[in-house]
Image: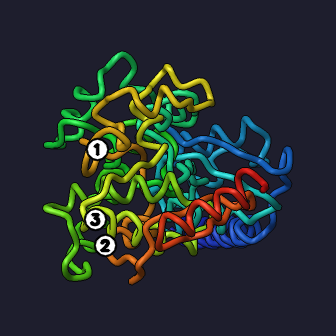
Amino acid sequence: MRRLIRWLIALVLLLGAVSGAAAWWLHGFANRPLDLPVAPFEFNVARGASLKAVDRQLHESGLLPQAQVLWWLGRVTGQTGIQAGRYRLDKPTTPLALLKKLNDGDVVPVLITFVEGITFAEMRAQLSRDAAFKGTLAGLSDREVLRRLGAEEAHPEGWFAPDTYRFTDGATDLDVLKLAYQTQKRRLAAAWSSRAEGLPYQSPYEALIMASIIEKETGKGEERPLIASVFVNRLRMPMRLQTDPTVIYGMGARFDGNIRKRDLTLDTPYNTYTRDGLPPTPIAMPGAAAINAALNPARSDRLYFVAKGDGSHHFSASLEEHNRAVRKFQLKQ
C-alpha cells in the first residue's frame, strides 16, 4: 500500500513537472517572434475555417515551427474565434499577437476608388476589371442592376457616390455598388435638408442633375459654388444652360474627343443649347462638394464663364464681358 502511495505521489509530481514545463514552453512560444517565410507574408483564412485548420495551414507554409501549437495556445487563452479574410504580416510577430489579429479580424482591406465625374458605365467597367471583387453583374442591364440593389430609380446615373471604399476579401461587385448607392442617397438627403432658399429645383433629383453638371464643368474645386451660381442664375431667368458636358453625354459613343458646331445644334434630350432647363438625368457621378455647391451656390450675378487654360475660369455677368474673355483666353487676341 505504501509503495502504491509513493508511486502515486511520484506520478503526480511528474505530471506537475511536465505540465509546468509545457506551460513554460508554451509561454515562451507565445511571446517569441516568428520568422516570416517571406516579407511581407500574406495568407488567406477561408470562411468557416477552424483555428486548427489555420494552424496546419500556417505550419505548412513555414510560419509556425510546430503544428497545433497555435491551436493549443488559442485554447489556453480562450482565443479560438477567428475571422475570415486576407491577412498580412509585414514584420515578425509573436504567436500571441497573431492570435489576437485572427480573433480581431485585422484583415488587409480591399480598397476601390471611384473618382468624381465618372459615369455609371465607367464605374461598372472599373469594377469588372478589378479582380479583388467577385463579379455577379456581368450581362445584366443597368435596370436589372438597380433591381438587384432594391433601388426605385429608373436610371442609375448620378446615384452612386464617388469615393474610396474599404471591403474585406470576398466582397462582390454588388456589395460595392450597394454601399456607393446608399452613400449617395444619404449625402443628397443631408444636403437637400440644408439647402439655400429660393433654388429653382423641384426635387432633390433635379439638384443631383445640376450637381453632375457642376462636377463635369469644374477644373478647380474652389470654383464649384461660383459655377453653380452661373447655372442657377440661368435657370432663374430663364436662360438655357448651354453646357458642353450635357451635349457630350447625349452623344454617347458618337463622341470622339471633339465637339463640333453640328453637335451643338443637333437636338437630343441632353442638348442644353437646344432645350430649356435641366437634362432628364444626371450626366455623371457628382461628389459631395458638387452636391453641396448645387444646393448652396455662391451669391453672384455671373451668367457666363470661360476656361482660362490653367483649369480655372473667368466669370462674367454680361455677354459683352464674356466675349472679351473668350477673345483673350480662347482666341488669344
Q: Secondary structure at mark 3?
A: helix
Q: Amino acid at mark 3?
A: Leu
Q: Secondary structure at mark 2?
A: helix
How many angstroms separate mark 2 from mark 3 (CA)? 9 Å
Q: Residues within 10 Å of mark 2 (few under 14, many from 20)?
A: many
Q: Observer-nearest residue: 168 or 255?
A: 255
Q: Earlier in the sequence, mark 1 or mark 2?
A: 1
- Which residue is found at the position 20% from the left and 82% from the top? 197
Residue 141 location in percent, x, y?
29, 22
Q: Which mark is residue 188?
A: 3
Q: Which mark is residue 295?
A: 2
Q: Observer-nearest residue: 162 or 62?
A: 162
Specify whether 252 is left or right of 142: right
Residue 83 shows up from this direction: yes
Q: Which is in the foreground here, disc 2 or disc 3?
A: 2
Judge whether 277 appears above or below 300 on screen.
above
How many angstroms separate mark 1 from mark 2 (CA)? 17 Å
From the image, tell me which residue sits under label 1: 279
Q: Earlier in the sequence, mark 1 or mark 3?
A: 3
How many angstroms separate mark 1 from mark 3 (CA)? 18 Å
Q: Residues within 10 Å of mark 3 (few under 14, many from 20)?
A: many
Q: Are marks 1 and 3 in contact (CB under 8 Å)?
A: no
Q: Quadrant of residue 53?
A: top right
Q: Amino acid at mark 1?
A: Pro
